[in-house]
Image (spheres, helix red, strand yellow):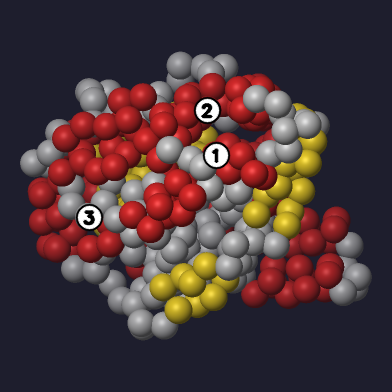
Amino acid sequence: MPTKLPSRADHVGSFLRPREIIEARQHVSADNLSRGQLRNIEDAAIAELVEWQKSLGLKAITDGEFRRYFFHTDFLLQLAGVEERGGLKKAFKNDAGKDVSFAPPVMVVTGKIAHQRPIQLADYQYLAGKVGEGFMPKVTIPSPTMLHFRAGRAGIPEDVYPTMDEFYADVAAAYRAEVDSLVAAGCRYIQMDDTNLAYLCDDEQRADAAKRGMDPDATTRQYAKLINDSFASAPADMIKAIHLCRGNFRSSWAAEGGYEPVAEIMFNELDIDAFFLEYDDPRSGDFAPLRFLPKGKTVVLGLVTTKLGELENKDDIKRRIDEAAKFADIDQLALSPQCGFASTVHGNDITTEQQAAKIRLCVEVAQEVWG
């Protein structure tokens, strides 16, 4: 069965922010520039980015998340009942052997969760107006699980939500309202970015979750239901994707471990068309978990790293695709970089030229493997 994706070469969504956007944000913080002026600068940069993606051979086109500071907070804070608090300090690790200390902000539930207004609609409409025939605008949003995992039940006040079922129902309803607003505008490709299913592959993170009172396997199943409920109103021609991320901050990561602990539940209980999985280094484990992939779903192999500038060898990538094809039908596979190039405004420690070379490599390999 052919993949629903517009191309066998795809990408996770974010790209390195241009200097003019970074500087404009600083000017807004210092009250030297209005939000409207910032948006005009973002518009111009996104228009350029769209043409750049098309020139590299991509068919799925994003706005690079140029309008966001973090991949998740800008979205989640627009829901009623969500506030930002200081994060859990976490030593992100990198290939230089140094720890990068970073406390991603934690989303805290302070009231009933509700969709107050369309969040991505204006951004989607601008992007769709620039993409043109033969290309597909893709919207990336944080997974609804981001409102639960880091704090667990302790982050959800019992006076607001006496039962967790009520909480999950409200979160899913808020997400459905957002999906509906995008669908009405013509959007047919949404990807949810989820660090938590990936964290549930990590022994240390699973142990930490258990300390927060969570059963890791039951949580995986609950998250699958939550994501399904969030997409429940999506039409049949919508591409529903999910990206599992082990943390991505300035070329560093937060979690490790293969997909075995979550694979069977994830592939079979998540009603998702495409799974973007990180497979750029040994931390990601082997391809054996792909044996659980049922017919009709696609795994996008993240074999090209966004963390390091050095370009992968084409033959090595093809060899790894062959290894993956021992566990899943090659017609159910595709290729992408392992993550975005800038999950936060800081971006990974690579150059824009290296970023372009990585995308070009994915496009060329996909054409040679799948035609």
Q: Residue at x 18, y 59 (%)?
A: 317
Label pair 1/2, CB-CB below 8 angstroms: yes
Specify whether 17 is left or right of 211: right
Residue annotated with mark 3: 285
Give residue 253's position: percent from left, percent from top.
Answer: 43, 66
Along the viewing direction, whichever of 257 and 314 lies nearer the viewer: 257
Along the viewing direction, whichever of 93 and 7 lies nearer the viewer: 93
Say which amino acid is labelled 1.
Thr
Q: Residue at x 40, y 50 (%)?
A: 206
Q: Residue at x 65, y 25 (%)?
A: 163
Q: Which mark is residue 223?
A: none
Say which amino acid is labelled 3.
Gly
Along the viewing direction, whichever of 100 and 339 lies nearer the viewer: 100
Label pair 1/3, CB-CB below 8 angstroms: no
**Is residue 88 positioned above or below 348 on the image?**
above
**Is residue 298 positioned above or below 180 on the image?**
below
Q: Quadrant of the N terminus?
A: top left
Q: Quadrant of the C terminus?
A: top left
Q: Which mark is residue 145?
A: 1
N-terminal of the pair, mark 1 or mark 3, is 1
